[in-house]
Image (cartoon, helix red, strand yellow):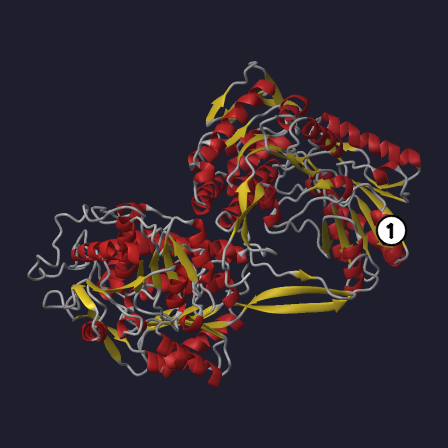
Amino acid sequence: MASRRISSLLSRSFSASSATLFSRGRSTSNLSRGINKYSTAAALEDPINPPVNVNYTQLLIGGQFVDAASGKTFQTLDPRTGDVIANVAEGDAEDVNRAVATARKAFDEGPWPRMTAYERQRVLLRFADLIEQHNDELAALETWDNGKPYEQAAKIEVPMLARLMRYYAGWADKIHGLTVPADGPYHVQTLHEPIGVAGQIIPWNFPLLMFGWKVGPALACGNTIVMKTAEQTPLSALLASKLLHEAGLPSGVLNVVSGFGPTAGAAIANHMDVDKLAFTGSTATGKVVLQLASKSNLKPVTLELGGKSPFIVCEDADVDKAVELAHFALFFNQGQCCCAGSRTFVHERVYDEFVEKAKARALNRSVGDPFKGGIEQGPQIDTDQFDKILNYINSGIESGATLETGGERFGNKGYYIKPTVFSNVKDDMLIAKDEIFGPVQTILKYKDLDEVIRRANSTHYGLAAGVFTHNIDTANTLTRALRVGTVWVNCFDTFDAAIPFGGYKMSGHGREKGIYSLNNYLQVKAVVTPLNNPAWL
Amino acid sequence: MTSHSNGNSDSFVKMPTIKFTKLFINGKFVDSISGKTFETIDPRTEEAITRVAEGDKEDIDLAVKAAREAFDNGPWPRLSGFDRGRIMMKFADLIDEHAEELAALDTIDAGKLFVEGKAGIPHSANMLRYYAGAADKIHGEVLKMSREFHAYTLREPIGVVGHIIPWNFPTAMFLGKVSPALAAGCTMVVKPAEQTPLSALYYAHLSKLAGIPDGVLNVATGFGPTAGAAISSHMDIDAVSFTGSTEVGREVMQAAAKSNLKTLSLELGGKSPLIIFDDADLDKAAELALLGILYNKGEICVASSRVFVQEGIYDEFVKKLLEKKKSWTVGDPFDPKVRQGPQIDKKQFDKILSYIEHGKREGATLLTGGKPLGHNKGYYIEPTVFTDVKEDMLIAKDEIFGPVMSLMKFKTIDEAIKKANNTTYGLAAGVMTKDLNVANTVSRSIRAGIIWINCYFAFDQDVPYGGYKMSGFGRDFGLDALYKYLQVKSVVTPIYNSPWL
C-alpha cells in the first residue's frame, strides 16, 4: 500500500474503514489552518502533475480493449484546467451491440453463471485485493478526471470500493430462495436466478463507487454486464475493469463502453437483449431511460436520480455541530451529490446564529487543486455544470435571497466556484426547488415541526434527509414523516455497503447496496409440483 | 476379500513435528494448573504420539475468565462485522498455507485419510470464509406494531460460548463450530476430544497469527467428565454447542439445566437410513451405500448404517455391493490408495467387534467382513455387511460408529418410510429413486434433519444440518448456525403523529 498522507481534513473519517464520511462534532476549521482560503488566494498555483499514467482509453468488450467501431474518440478533460487528459474511444450503438452480444454469450454459454457461487466470491475477493494494491493509482485517475480531492478518493472512496466488493463477495453464496407453504398438497420452492445481461449507466460524480454499487451485486448474482460510464469520467472504470479481469473474471462478463448518453446510453436502454437496466443520473435522463425501456423490451429498471434533500436543524440543536454537519452535507464532493443536503431548514430560534456560522464555515472552506493536501473542494466537473451553477446563483440573487458569501468563480482557470451560502430563501425560489448540484447552500427558516415536515416533503424529489436533534420523539416523528429513501439522524452521507440507498418519488425506483440490491439482479422462479400423501403441509 | 495395505507411512509423507501440546488460554500456550498431561495415541500403531496438557475445572475457569473479559471489555464484539470478517479471511488463508501439516496431524491423531485431509482442510477453511462473508450481514428486523410504537430487533452476540467437539472430524468440527461464533462476535472456549487434540491447538496458534484478539478463542484439551463437564456446568458460559454421543449429550443438557440454563445445541448420534427404490441407478446406489457406511471408517454421525433396498433389486444390489467392496482398500491412511484407515481407539475397536458378534448371535447373516485386519497392530476392521437384519436387532437399533452395514429389504414406499422412521434418532437419510413423487414423499416423511436424494454426504457450508428426535437440536452450518450464537433483543419506543403504522 502506497503512502497515505493524512495531513488532511476529516482525518478521523479518512482512517475509518466503516466509511463514516463525517465524524460528528469534529471541527475542521482549526485543521485547515495554513491552507490557502479562496478569500485570500488571488489565483491558483500551477496544477500539480497527477502521479499516474492513463493506460486504458479503449472500450472493453469481450475481455479485450478495442477501438470504437467508428474509430471515433472524445476528449476527457481535466476540470482543474479544461485541458485534455486523454482521447477515449467513443462507443455508439454498434459498439453497444457488440458488447451486448458478448455479454449475452457469456451469460447463455459462459462459465460465470455456471461456476459455484464460492468461485464467484473468490474472484470478487481477489478484485478487492487488487483494488487495495492499486489504491493510489485508482484514486489519482479519479481525481484527475473528476476534480474531487485526492485524499477523499484515496482514503475514502477507493477503500470503500474494495469494501463493497468484499461485501458482495460474501453474498454470492448466500442467495437463498424460499420453500413456500402452499394451500394444498404442493411442494413449492423459489429459485433466485441471475437475471441475465445487465445494462448499467453510471454518472460522473463518484465514478468508482457507482461502478462498485452496480457491478458488485450484479456479479455476485452471476449476471453479465454492459456498462456505460459517464463521458466526463471514463478513466477509472477502465482500470478497475482491467483489475477485475486480472482477478479472474471470465471475458465477456463485464463490458465497458465509454461514450455519450444519447448514443451509447440510449443504445443500452433501448436494447432488446439487455435484461435489466440500472441507471444513476439526472431525473430528466432517468425519464428518457425509462421510456426507452418501456418502448423496447420492458426491461426492469432501477433508477437513482436527483434530489433536493432537506437537512433539518431542530431547535434543540448544538448550533456549532449543526453548522458543521450541514456544511458537510451540502459541500461534500463540490456539492455534486444526488443526496446533498441542499435545503437547510433551520428552526427560527437558532436561525440567526446558524446563518452567521454557516457563512463563516463556508468562507473557511479550502478550495484549490484537489491533488493538494488539505484541500476540501476542487473544481466542478465541467463547463456545463459550472455555467449552470453560476446561473442558479444569479437566479437566487434575482429572486431576493440573501447572498451571504461566495457566488462567483474562484480563480481564473478551471471550473472552481466559491462556496456559496444563501439565506432568507423561500420555498418557491428556483434555488430551493431545483437540484443545483454545486456548492450552493440555501438556508430556510421554519417555526414548528409540522411546518417543516410539510415543506421538506413539498418537492418532487425524495432521496434523503438529514435530521439534527437529540430529542428521540422529534427524531422518530421526522424519520417516519419524511418521504425519502434515507434519513440520517445526527449524521450525513454515512454510506456503507450494507445500507440500502435510493429514492422516493421522482428520485427514482428501487434500492442499491445492501441485501436489497441483490433483488435488482435476480429473477424469482417459483417451482411447483404436487405431493402424494405428504406427511405434513 | 478386502485388500489391505500395510505400506510404510514414511514412504508416503513426512511425519509432522508436534509443535503445540499445551492449553491455549488468553492468547498463550500454558501448562495445565495441575501440571498433568495425557497421551494422544496414533491409531495406526497404538503408540503414543505425544503428551498433551490435561485441562480440568481450574483451567476451564481460567479460559472462561479470559473469554468473558474478551467479550465484556475486549475489541472482538465491538469490531464491525466487516472487520471481524477480514480477520477470519486471514485465518482461512493461514489454514490453506498449512493444510498439509494440519492434514498430517489429523491423520496421525485420528487415523483419517491423508489425501482427503489435504484436500478437505482448505475446504473446511471455506467455512471460515463463508461466515466471514456473513459477519456483516446479520440483520435484525424492524417490526410492525399494532399500536403507535416503533420497534426493531437487534441480533446481539450471545456471549461466551463453549464448544465441545468430537474426534471423528477434528478439523471440520472445529471450524464448523468456531466460524459462526466468531462471525457473531462471540468469544469461546473449545474443548477438542481427548483422542484428537493436536489440530485444534494448531488452529489456535493460527488464529492468533491471523489477528484474533487474545481471549476470543481459547482451546482447553482434556477429558469429558472433567474439562467438558466444567464447560457445560459453568455459570459464566452463555451457550454450549456440543457434538458427540447421545448419552454424553444428555449429560451436557443436564449440566446446563442444573447450572445457568445456558442455551444449548446438541448434534448427537444417528442411525440414518438409506432407502433404495427399484428404479434407482443400481451402480450409484451400491457405491453410495458403501461410501455411506465406510466413509471415515463409519465414524460419522450421519453414516447410512441402515440400508433399505426394495425387493425388486435386492439380489442384484447385494451382488453389486460385494463387487464394489473388492476395490475398497483398508490400510495406512497415509497411503493414497487406501480408502479406510484404523478406528480411532481401542475402545471403539472393541465396541464395533462386539456389535458384530451381537449381529451374528441375533441371527443376522454376515455377508462379508466382520473381522479385525492388520497384523496385530492398529485398530483396523474389515468393511462388514449384515443381511437378513431385523428391525429389533441391536445392530439395527444402536449407533455402531464403525464400518458395519445393516442391509434390509422392503416392499412398498409406506413400509420403507415406517421402517426408516422406526428409530430414536433423526439425523439424516438418503433416498435413491428417479421418481419425483417418491422423492418428495419420502423427503417430507422422514423425521430427520437432512435428506440426500440420489447423493449422500452432500455437506456444504450453506446447508444447515442437525437432528430430529434424539439426534439433538439446533443446526450447524448455514445461516442457522450463525443464529445459534446470537441473542434477539427487541427495542420498543412510542412514536407520535406517525403518518403510517
In the image, residue B91 above or below residue A513 = above
In the image, residue A167 above or below residue A186 = above
Left or right, A109 with reference to B39: left
Residue B377's quadrant in the figure?
Answer: top right
SS for callout 1:
helix
- Number of numbered tags placed on the structure image: 1
A257 and B109: which one is in front?
A257
In the image, residue B160 above or below residue A66 = above
Q: Position of residue B190 (x, y in %)?
A: 57, 31
User: Residue at the location (66% across, 44% down)?
Assistant: B475
In the image, residue A214 above or below residue A324 = below
Q: Label 1 crowding class (10 Å Cα cut-off): few <14, some 14-19, many 20+?
A: few
User: Residue at the location (28% across, 50% down)?
Assistant: A319
Q: Can residue B284 be seen in the rendering of this structure?
A: yes
Output the chain of dot 1. Answer: B
Judged from this view, the residue extending furthest toward the bottom is A295
Judged from this view, the residue extending furthest toward the right is B363
Residue A486's quadrant in the figure?
Answer: bottom left
Q: Can residue B376 be seen in the rendering of this structure?
A: no
Q: Position of residue B25 (x, y in %)?
A: 50, 25
Q: Position of residue A332 (x, y in %)?
A: 27, 59
User: Residue at the location (50% across, 63% down)?
Assistant: B499
B430 and A502: which one is in front?
A502
Left or right, B165 with reference to B326: left
Amino acid type, label 1: Lys
Q: Which residue is mark 1?
A: B418
Q: Position of residue B398 (x, y in %)?
A: 82, 37
Left or right, B183 with reference to B270: left
Q: Which quadrant would the C terminus of chain A be assigned to in this image?
A: bottom right
Judged from this view, the residue extending furthest toward the top is B34
